[in-house]
Amino acid sequence: MARTPYIVVPLLVAVALSGATGARMLLSEPDPADAGATVECWDGLRTDSLENCSRPRSEEGLAWVFPSLDTAECEDPHPDRTGPAKVECEESIGRKPVTIRYGAVGEVEGGRSYFEKTYADGARAEAKAPDGSVNRYVWRLPEPTPSGDWVLTSMYREHPFFVTVEAPTARARDRAFKRFVEMRDPGEVRGTVIR
């Protein structure tokens, strides 16, 4: 009988604590904006499906698709132009100047056709996801352009977004692409699952 308080008191404390925690959870007010939300879209909208998220647009959309893009450090090369967003950034790698252009095209097929023609003499590689599916294409020119730049472009397979890297050497181009360019996972281009 002497052991009863050693067993009953801790049990009563545990029941009281779990009851208080449960009551706090039951009585707290859920945020009505998040009720049922499982996805946060690129523009901050919360919804129940990625399909309800719009395609990213404007410089803010490009910065979502390419987390490496710092819009404060880059500029629109043609601010008077209308159409899909394009942003140009200047970097350097190994004391060599590098130009990085982030952009969007009106439609995926048209953009891919354009890059296939532009890089007709070059090589196209496929960037693959962990499951083996192709999620991006990467084109490289086999020699420098007439202006002396070595050029690479990467475009999503199913999204109209691309990035182009230009540098004075092929090595600087490839190093700059690896170091400065971050492309969001294709499944997260429109938004991310939050729960």
Image (tube, rainbow, N blue to C red):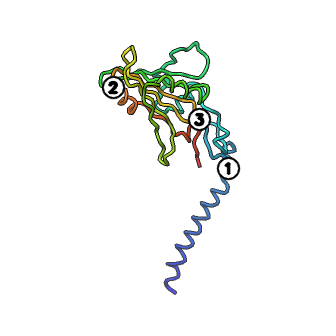
Q: Position of residue 159 (x, y in %)?
A: 57, 33
Identity, as a three-letter code, of the amino acid under mark 3? Trp
Q: Earlier in the sequence, mark 3 or mark 2?
A: 3
Q: Position of residue 52 (x, y in %)?
A: 67, 39
Residue for badge 1: 29
Identity, as a three-letter code, of the amino acid under mark 1? Glu
122 sits left or right of 36 in the view: left
User: Viewer-proximal residue, 121 or 181?
Assistant: 121
Q: Position of residue 6 (x, y in %)?
A: 49, 78
> Closer to the camera: disc 3 or disc 1?
3
User: Viewer-proximal residue, 72 or 189?
Assistant: 189
Q: Estimate how packed mark 1 is, as few (under 14), some (14 to 19) or many (20 or more) residues with alpha carbons within 10 Å.
A: few
Q: Earlier in the sequence, mark 2 or mark 1?
A: 1
Q: Residue at x 55, y 69 (%)?
A: 13
Q: Which mark is residue 93?
A: 2
Q: CA distance from mark 3 to mark 2?
A: 30 Å
Q: CA distance from mark 3 to mark 1?
A: 26 Å
Q: Residue at x 62, y 64 (%)?
A: 19
Q: Earlier in the sequence, mark 3 or mark 1?
A: 1
> Closer to the camera: disc 3 or disc 2?
2
Residue for badge 3: 42
189 sits left or right of 99 in the view: right
Q: Is residue 2 above or below residue 170?
A: below
Q: CA distance from mark 2 to mark 1?
A: 52 Å
Q: Secondary structure at mark 2?
A: strand
